[in-house]
Structures are given as C-alpha cells and as structure tokens.
Image (cartoon, rainbow, N blue to C red):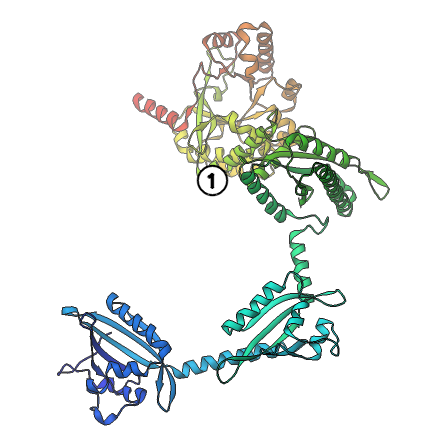
C-alpha cells in the first residue's frame, strides 16, 4: 500500500475525505519502539477524539498513540491481536485481523484492520494500512443468524413436541405432543431429565447424553437423532433440537427444545439402504454388497492367514427359458435359485456350527451369497478348502438341475456352471479374484456345462481361457495404440507352371499381420488370431489390414509394377453385411489396380455362411480381383467347394506338403489336388515349403507356386518395399 504525498512529504488532501482510518506507523521490535507517523481525519469519528487538536487534513502523531489504541481494544481480542501483529512484523507479511473496540458511551464497535509492511534501515518497519468500521456488517450477520434459528424452529412447528427444562432441578415441562411421542400418561409420568434417559434405546443413551453434556459445557445448539422405546414396546425415532437460556450473569439456567418424530423418514431411509444393497427380484444381496464382503474376506485372509473360496455361477440354457416362456418365467426360476442357494448356505451353517459346538470352538461366519445380475450368482465360502468347495458346488449344480419349473403347461430344466478361485493370504486384489472366478466359470461352460472348474486347477483350462481374454484385450489396445504391423512373405511362381494367367507373372507376396505386446515384443499370429476369432475381433483386424495395405502402402506397392499381393479375409468379415461397402470404398481409394489384389478365404470361413461367401466371392471376382481358397484339403467336402464357388487359385494345406518327402500317401493326395485343380482351370500354391527337398517335389508335381521358408521368411512390409524399390533403382 502506498500513500501519496505532497511537496512537504505528507499525504495529500485526498486522505481527509476517506471514511476509513488511514495510518502509517514505524516499528522497531528490537528497540521496542512504536511511532504513529500520521492518520487521517476519520480517526476522530471512529475513536471519539478531539478534532480541535489536529489540522484540516491530518492530525499530529501525538494526538493518536498506540497506547491509546490498545487501551480501547476488547480484552479478549487484545492478546491475539498483539501476537499476530508482532509475527507479521518479523515476517514482513500482510496483516489482516478483526477485533472489537470498547468506546465509552457508545458500546462495542467492530474493526477490520489491514496493513502492509515495508522494511527500513536499522531494524525499522513501516506499516501503512486502513482501519474500517464493520460494526453494521457484524450486526447484520448476528441478526441474520438469529433470524435463521427462529426460522428453523418455526419450520419444525408442524408435528413437533416442545419442552422446557430447569437445569438446576432437572424438572421438565412437556406439551401434549411430547407425551404422545413417548407414549406416557401426563398424570402418572414424572417428567425429569433422568426419566427421559430411561426411555432412550439401549444403544443410544451414551451418545445422546454425551451430546447433551457437550452443549452444557460449550453452549452450542443440540441437534441429534436418537431412538426411544415406548412403554408398550414400540420403537420410535426422534430428532431433538435444543439450546441453553442464560441468566443475566451468563450462566445457563434453562434449556428449551423440540422433538420431531422421524420414524417414517428413518424407516424409509433404511428401506432405501436395504434396496440399494439387495437385489429386488431374489432378495439376495447385490453385486455392490458382495464386492464389499469380498474385500473384507480378502483383508481377513491376508491378516489372519485364513482360506476362503469365491464361487461364480452362471445358469446354463437360461436364455432359452427367457426367450421361449418369457421373462416372468425366467424371474420365477431366478427366485427359486436364490432361495435354493440361501437355504443351502443355512443348512451348511447349521451343520458346521453344531460340529464346532461339540468341539467347543467358536462358530465361523456364515457363508455369503449374492445375485450379481442377470443369471449370475456368487458365493463366499468362509474357511473352506478348494476340495470342499468343489464338492459343495457340485451339490448346488445337482440341486439346480433337479428344479423343474412348470410354466403354462411346459416343464423347463436349467443347469449351471460354477467357477472357483481360492482366497488366501497370497491372493491378488478382489477385482482380479472376481475375474479369475468369472473366467473359470466360462471355461466350465466351454467344457460342456453343468461343470465345476477351479482356477489354477489340474487341467489349466481356466488359465488358458483367461490368457485368451487378456490377449483379446491386448488386440483392442494394439489397434488403438498402433502396435500392429504388416509383414510380407514371397510366393514364388515355379518354372513350368501350367498357367499363363497374367496374375501369375511377376512377383507375388502374401500380406501377413503381426502384433506387438505391451512390452513391444512381436507376436506371431498363432498367439493372437485364435483369441481374435473367439471374441469376434477378426473383422476389426481385417479392416485394419485392408486400410493399411491398400491405402497407407497402396502407392508404394503400386510403384513396384510387377508385384501382386494376397490379403486374408476372415469368416467374421464375410458374414458382416457392412463389410463389402467398406471394402469397396477402400479399393476405390487405393492406387493398386484390381488384378494386382487377390483375396484368400479359408474353407472354414465359407462353411460358416455359404450364401454370404458365395455372394461376396461373386462380387469380388466381378470387380477383377483374384480369389484363392486357403488351407485346401482340411475339410471333409473340400472338392465339393470347387464346384460351388468361383475361385481362381487354391493353397494346398501345409499338413499335406510338409511330410511329402517321407509320405507317399501325402504326395499322392497333393498330386490329386493339383491335377483336379488344373483341370478346373484353378492355379495351385504349395504352403509350408520349408526345405529344398520339398521344393523339388513340388516342382516335380507341377504345382504353380510355392510359399514357405525355403522361398523366403516373412519380413516387415516396409523392408520388402525398400528392397524392391532399391532393386528397381539399380536397374535403371
């Protein structure tokens, strides 16, 4: 804060019209000196000084000393005010405090003091600041507070009971509503503080009475909720508001307050709590509650070295019931299952408790179950081995299979699959445990339904299923994070090939896909393609390959004039009605001409939807692209497909090619496939040609093209394009 000065170094006339007190002081804490340099005329009004002692704009420092000011401060505020001022002076920090001023004849006034320090030589500090009278503001705040309290009490006047107590005698005066609330007779009930405490619920006296004692010592307003037991045994829930009334000497003399019956609100609150924690259909706890119990069980296992088991159950064939008989029938069955699980838990608990009682042991917690949603249930089996849990899970499945739901003249039977995982001191997080049990359950379904499977059990099926889930998740991440990469593998046209079709001239490569894992390691297709097929992600991969091969690399591939490429398509894409429009737009945007782009389709992809495959192949060939039947010979009806589908080439499956040099049977099969294909006008490709001997046999048979390690290993597409571009440059 800076004060403007005139020619003589004093503040200008402007300060004389400011309604707040403007001051400057110099302080030397080391020498304990405090000097008031100047104040403006507002000090006269605020502090009740003699105006004749000063000039028109400013007053002499002698007129207003620090001692005069300190003498007017309310004693309760004086100590903290001085300590704070000294602290800010040493720290050279802004000072901002409020205090009360006691002026003779005018009463209490509230001041707001704000000042900024400036260090001077020889230990002096100059303070410049403003003192504002905020009495009106404080009075307005107090009036607002009192008005708000009256308003809150007035709001409670509908359906409230009012009481008044003499603190010295503990005698109370109640109105009629208070007697009604507590269910006591006005003529026979001796109203006192002690009698009221006797009506409190057993769990409430200490807390409620403690809050009451607190307001007696602090003078605060009491606001608490408590339960009472009326003489007829019925409970009620009350809210109490109370405050102290003080005498002229400031000592509390009486307490006045109100009671409000909140029984309906309390019951509604607890009903809503129950609804939030339980499944409305079965009455079992819900997923949120179960997850809380699971977290507690995990903590317990870690802390006390105990072993529990988590069970995850999914009903088998439940969708058939829902779809054929309707949701009402499905709901009825779910209620039966919920009751069955609950009674099963109760039966085991009674048997276990009785056994423990005979041994003189403390009973363990009762097992816990919940409906997670849909047709999924979960159980927590406390202090249970995995062997015992498997036995109980099979018992439960047998009991569910025994249910015969009769609905509108039809009888339905449903089964269930259960996945288990152990909860021990070494277990992972509750979230991971739920995932393990879920995976084990669906692995049990895959094993034939009505099965029980333990995560980490003997056959490892659950773990394999879990790995596939993680891989599927990794595929989604790889697509989004750009961790997929295209590779290319050469397909060699052999000397003496019977076909002169233009697409067999020049060079050929198959476009292959590789994926990097979270650590940047390159994965082979066998590591992620099965998971992509199981979880319907092949269509996403196909689209990524097509966009990158045909558009991102399209111009570079088109520049290698005699190169044609083959791209694999999955069954997911063939069955997708939106795939052909996507492919059509992608091909139009590509720089590669149609005759240089071939598509490979497996027998399995065709079998999944013959009509879709036939229509797709017809459209693709009509657009000028070549079609190759991949993995030929593995199906039971391979030759039949040659009659039904318009294809240009076929790849003889590697399971026949690799063993040819030591298997006359495989060689005869390959020769037959090659001969029939040529007679039908179809060119042939031998897959998995991995050594020179096999390549020699392939040539001798007359197969048109060969692919495999003997020809060339897959290389990154960028590398292949760079090599081909360099080769072309060297020729010119």
Q: Residue at x 65, y 52 (%)?
A: 277
Residue 369 image position (x, y, % from top left): 68, 43
Q: Quadrant of residue 535?
A: top right
Q: Residue at x 64, y 60 (%)?
A: 203
Residue 522 image position (x, y, % from top left): 44, 28
Q: Residue furthest bottom?
A: 52
- 539, above or below 6, in the image: above
Q: Is residue 483 left or right of residue 372?
A: left
Residue with the mark numbered 1: 480
Residue 135 image position (x, y, % from top left): 39, 83
Q: Residue at x 67, y 51 (%)?
A: 278
Closest to the observer: 153 or 684?
A: 153
- 599, above or below 305, in the image: above
- 182, above or below 135, in the image: above
Closest to the observer: 657 or 116?
A: 116
Disc 1, SS: helix
10 Å crowding of disc 1: few (<14), some (14-19), many (20+): few
- 359, above or below 502, in the image: below
Q: Residue at x 67, y 39 (%)?
A: 361
Q: Is residue 652 left or right of residue 173?
A: left
Please say whether residue 327 is visible from this viewpoint. yes
Q: Residue furthest front?
A: 169
Q: Quadrant of residue 14?
A: bottom left
Q: Quadrant of residue 721?
A: top left
Residue 267 image position (x, y, % from top left): 69, 62
Quarter of the figure that contains the C terminus = top left
């Amino acid at each position: 804060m800076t004060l403007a000065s005139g020619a003589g170094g004093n503040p200008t006339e402007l300060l004389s019209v400011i309604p707040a007190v403007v001051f400057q002081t110099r302080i030397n804490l080391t020498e304990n000196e405090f000097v008031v340099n100047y104040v403006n005329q507002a000090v006269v009004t605020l502090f009740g000084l003699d105006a004749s002692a000063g000039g028109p704009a400013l007053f002499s420092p002698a007129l207003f000393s620090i001692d005069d000011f300190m003498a007017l401060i309310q004693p309760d505020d004086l100590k903290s005010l001085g300590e704070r001022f000294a602290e800010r002076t040493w720290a050279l920090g802004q000072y901002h405090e409020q205090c009360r001023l006691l002026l003779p004849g005018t009463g209490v006034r509230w001041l707001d003091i704000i000042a900024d320090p400036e260090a001077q030589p020889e230990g002096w500090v100059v303070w410049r600041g403003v003192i504002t009278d905020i009495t009106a503001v404080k009075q307005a705040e107090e009036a607002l507070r009192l008005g708000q309290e009256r308003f809150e009490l007035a709001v409670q006047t509908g359906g409230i009971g009012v009481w008044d107590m003499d603190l010295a005698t503990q005698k109370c005066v109640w109105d009629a509503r208070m007697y009604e609330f507590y269910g006591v007779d006005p003529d026979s009930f001796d109203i006192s503080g002690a009698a009221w405490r006797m009506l409190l619920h057993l769990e409430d006296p200490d807390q409620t009475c403690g809050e009451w004692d607190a307001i007696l010592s602090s003078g605060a307003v009491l606001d608490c909720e408590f339960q009472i037991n009326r003489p007829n045994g019925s409970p009620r829930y009350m809210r109490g508001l109370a405050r102290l009334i003080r005498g002229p000497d400031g000592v509390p003399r009486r307490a006045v307050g109100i009671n409000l019956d909140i029984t309906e609100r309390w019951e509604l609150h607890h009903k809503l709590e129950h609804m939030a924690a339980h499944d409305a259909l079965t009455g079992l706890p819900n997923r949120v509650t179960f997850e809380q119990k699971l977290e507690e069980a995990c903590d317990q296992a870690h802390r006390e070295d105990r072993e529990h088991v988590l069970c995850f159950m999914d009903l088998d064939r439940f969708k058939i019931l829902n779809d054929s008989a309707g949701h009402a029938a499905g709901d009825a069955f779910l209620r039966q299952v919920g009751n069955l699980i609950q009674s099963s838990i109760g039966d085991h608990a009674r048997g276990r408790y009785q056994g423990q009682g005979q041994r003189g042991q403390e009973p363990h917690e009762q097992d816990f179950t919940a409906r997670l949603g849909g047709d999924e249930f979960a159980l927590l089996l406390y202090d249970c081995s995995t062997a015992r849990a498997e036995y109980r899970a099979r018992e439960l499945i047998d009991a569910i299979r025994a249910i015969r739901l009769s609905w509108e003249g039809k009888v339905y039977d449903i089964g269930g699959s259960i996945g288990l995982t152990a909860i021990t001191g070494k277990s992972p997080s509750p979230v991971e445990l739920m995932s393990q049990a879920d995976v084990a359950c669906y692995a049990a379904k895959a094993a034939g339904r009505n099965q029980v499977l333990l995560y980490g059990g003997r056959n490892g099926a659950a773990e394999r299923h879990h790995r596939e889930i993680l891989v599927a998740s990794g595929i989604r991440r790889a697509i989004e994070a750009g961790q997929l990469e295209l590779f290319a593998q050469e397909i060699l046209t052999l000397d003496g090939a019977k076909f002169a079709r233009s697409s067999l001239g020049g060079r050929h490569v198959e476009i292959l896909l590789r994926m990097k894992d979270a650590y940047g390691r390159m994965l082979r297709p066998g590591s992620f393609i099965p998971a992509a097929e199981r979880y319907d992600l092949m269509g996403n991969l196909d689209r990524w390959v097509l966009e990158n091969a045909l558009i991102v690399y399209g111009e570079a591939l088109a520049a290698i004039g005699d190169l044609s490429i083959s791209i694999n398509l999955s069954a997911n894409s063939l069955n997708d009605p939106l795939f052909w429009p996507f492919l059509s737009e992608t091909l139009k945007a590509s720089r590669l001409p149609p005759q240089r782009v071939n598509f490979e389709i497996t027998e399995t992809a065709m079998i999944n939807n013959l009509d879709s495959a036939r229509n797709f192949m017809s459209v693709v060939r009509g657009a000028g692209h070549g079609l190759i039947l991949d993995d030929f010979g593995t199906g039971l009806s391979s030759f039949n497909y040659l009659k039904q589908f318009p294809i240009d080439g076929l790849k003889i499956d590697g399971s026949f090619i690799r063993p040819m040099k030591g298997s006359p049977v495989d060689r005869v099969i390959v020769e037959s496939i090659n001969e029939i294909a040529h007679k039908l006008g179809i060119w042939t490709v031998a897959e998995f040609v991995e050594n020179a001997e096999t390549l020699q046999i392939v040539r001798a048979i007359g197969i048109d093209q060969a692919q495999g390690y003997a020809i060339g290993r897959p290389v990154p597409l960028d590398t292949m394009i760079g090599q081909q571009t360099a080769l072309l440059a060297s020729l010119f």
